[in-house]
Image: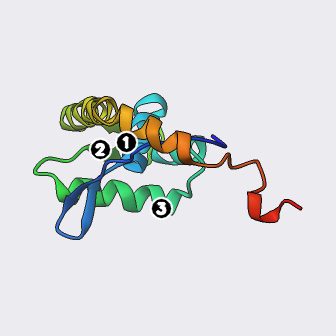
Amino acid sequence: MANSKSIRLRVLQGETIAFGPGKAALLQAIQQSGSISAAARAIGMSYRRAWLLVEAMNQCFKLPLVATATGGAKGGGAQVTPMGQEVLSHYQAMQGRAEAAVAADMAYFAGLMAALDTPSDATRH
């Protein structure tokens, strides 16, 4: 990702980020693992941060995006709800359309930007 140039969409509800790239990654990881803690580990996020993001998503939408079960004989877990799957799918499609819409502009900027791993002209002697 040393020279990545991309746009990052965020869906706001007032001042709160209701959904964005981090929450999308967390939902995908929860889908794969069935657990908030395992999902957090998989994407390099603290459990507390993941839990706060899940709570924020669930509060921003009319229906919860993640359903949780407390520990017990089977240890609890989490699953992405049908609403969560719908939101994730729609967000990913929206992200794809946005990237396609600005692809020429992003290529223009990419041509003007210096490589991240190359020292700038100002530091060369």
Relative to the observer, which residue lies in front, 93 or 16? 93
Local packing at callout 2 (Cα closer than 10 Å; few below 14, some 14-19, many 20+) is many
Quadrant (top left/top right/bottom left/bottom right) for the N terminus: top right
What residue is shown at x 54% (from left), y 46% (from top)?
112
Give the side of residue 34 with respect to residue 87, left or right: right
| Image coords of residue 75 (percent x, y) | 48, 42
Element carrying mark 1: helix
Badge number at residue 49: 3
Count up the numbered dots: 3
Q: Give the SS element for disc 2.
A: strand
The answer to whether mark 3 and mark 1 are in CB contact below 8 A is no
Q: Quadrant of the C terminus?
A: bottom right
Q: CA distance from mark 3 to mark 2?
A: 15 Å
Q: Is residue 2 above or below residue 93?
A: below
Q: Identify the residue at the far front of this view.
A: 125
- Specify the farthest residue to the left: 62
- Identified by mark 2, the residue type is Val
**Is 112 situated left or right of 54 in this image?**
right
Q: Which tag is nearer the camera, tag 3 or tag 2?
A: 3
The residue at 56%/58% (across/down) is 46
Q: Dot 1: within a 10 Å radius of its alpha carbon, few (fewer than 14), some, or many (20 or more) residues?
A: some
- Disc 2, disc 1: CB below 8 Å? no
Whether residue 100 is situated above or below residue 11 in the rendered picture: above
- Name the kind of residue labelled 1 in the image: Ala
- Among the two numbered marks 2 and 1 on one chain, the one whose residue lies closer to the N terminus: 1
Question: Can you see residue 54?
Answer: yes
Q: Secondary structure at mark 3?
A: helix
Mark drawn on residue 66: 2
Residue on which disc 1 sits: 24
Residue type of the residue flagged with mark 3:
Arg
Mark-to-mark CA distance, 3 and 1: 14 Å
